[in-house]
């Protein structure tokens, strides 16, 4: 893989009491790639994501982002890291009492010393970038469909022009058409903005549609990292069942058809 590793995970062990979730995780995420992170239920995908985000700390091991050990950063370094990353949590995690515009502006209010009019302009530009009309800006989250809320969350994640985008189950809860459109949007934005993307997902269609590589979390470790097509023939039992089962074969068969359909279509609000 070309490019520099912007996220490095080494020897991470995670235990909650006697329950060991990770036992020696090693993983690199390279600049400009979209890396999918998959694993069975309870394998610790979201736990690892939260450790990389420094929302929780591993029991042992080291995690560096942009060359900084995230467990040993000054407040200025942490603020700089916050500005360089965007996060879309599952469900969007919007502030229910704020309008769409105010939700998208929230990181700017925290990190940018800008006039309110400029923040409004930036936020409106990001709202348009994720495929929403400007009429959405004044709405409350409860007025939006699930797909629109995810787009608002994505606009907020992008408002600081981050270098890394973290996505936690971005297509969960969307119907197949809405999920395919959201995949297409992520791929487009990654290419246009030269984003590095780490995406936790269980959606096989997403893996084949947008991911350059997929990291598989099983047996409390990363047991494989490869392009999704290469994992079809992997001999690990969980990987084989996941990628070579009926859903995996359907996702592979539909990959080209979905890409062709979306390249000629617009985005929806499902």
Image (cartoon, rainbow, N blue to C red):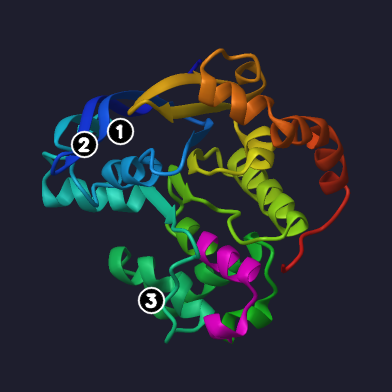
For residue 160, which quarter of the picture? bottom left
Q: Is residue 147 visible?
A: yes
Q: How crowded is mark 2: few (under 14 residues within 10 Å), some or many (20 or more)?
A: many
Q: Residue 66 carries which label?
A: 1
- Left or right: residue 219 versus residue 259 is left
- Left or right: residue 144 versus residue 249 is left
Q: Gap in Å between the C-alphas at discs 1 and 2?
A: 22 Å
Mark found first going from the N terminus, 1 or 3 = 1
Asked if the residues shown at circle 1 and circle 2 are in contact, with their CB atoms under 8 angstroms apart, the answer is no
Residue under the image location 27 percent in, 32 percent down? 22
Asked if the residues shown at circle 1 and circle 3 are in contact, with their CB atoms under 8 angstroms apart, the answer is no
- Left or right: residue 54 versus residue 3 is left
Q: Does the magenta stretch include residue 75?
A: no
Q: Which mark is residue 14?
A: 2
Q: Position of residue 166 (x, y in %)?
A: 44, 47
Q: Residues within 10 Å of mark 1 (few under 14, many from 20)?
A: some
Q: What element carries label 3?
A: loop
Q: Position of residue 34 (x, y in %)?
A: 54, 34
The image shows residue 200, relative to residue 143, as above or below, that is above
Q: Gap in Å between the C-alphas at discs 3 and 2?
A: 43 Å
Nearer to us in this view, 112 or 18: 18
Residue under the image location 31 percent in, 27 percent down? 8
The image shows residue 126, relative to residue 34, as above or below, that is below
Q: Is mark 2 on a helix, strand or loop?
A: strand
Residue under label 3, please give it: 115
Q: Main secondary structure of the magenta part?
A: helix
Q: Gap in Å between the C-alphas at discs 1 and 3?
A: 30 Å
Number of the front mark, 3 or 2: 2
Q: Position of residue 210 (x, y in %)?
A: 65, 37
């Amino acid at each position: 893989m070309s490019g520099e590793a912007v996220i490095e995970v080494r020897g991470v062990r995670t235990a909650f009491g006697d329950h060991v979730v990770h036992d020696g995780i090693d993983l690199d995420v390279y600049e400009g790639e979209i890396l999918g992170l998959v694993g069975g239920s309870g394998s610790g995908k979201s736990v690892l994501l939260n450790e990389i985000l420094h929302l929780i700390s591993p029991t042992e091991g080291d995690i560096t982002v942009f060359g900084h050990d995230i467990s040993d950063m000054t407040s200025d370094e942490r603020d700089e890291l916050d500005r360089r990353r965007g996060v879309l949590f599952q469900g969007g995690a919007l502030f229910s009492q704020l309008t769409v515009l105010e939700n998208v502006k929230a990181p700017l209010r925290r990190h940018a010393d800008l006039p309110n009019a400029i923040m409004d302009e930036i936020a409106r530009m990001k709202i348009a970038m994720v495929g929403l009309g400007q009429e959405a800006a004044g709405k409350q989250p409860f007025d939006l469909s699930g797909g629109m809320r995810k787009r608002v969350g994505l606009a907020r994640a992008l408002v600081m022009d981050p270098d890394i985008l973290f996505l936690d189950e971005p297509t969960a809860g969307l119907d197949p058409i809405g999920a395919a459109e959201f995949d297409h949007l992520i791929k487009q934005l990654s290419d246009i903005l030269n984003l590095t993307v780490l995406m936790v997902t269980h959606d096989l269609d997403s893996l084949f549609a947008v991911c350059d590589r997929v990291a598989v979390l099983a047996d409390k470790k990363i047991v494989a990292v490869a392009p999704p097509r290469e994992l079809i023939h992997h001999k690990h039992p969980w990987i084989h069942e996941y990628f070579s089962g009926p859903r995996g074969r359907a996702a592979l068969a539909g990959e080209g058809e979905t890409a062709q359909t979306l390249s000629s279509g617009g985005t929806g609000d499902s």
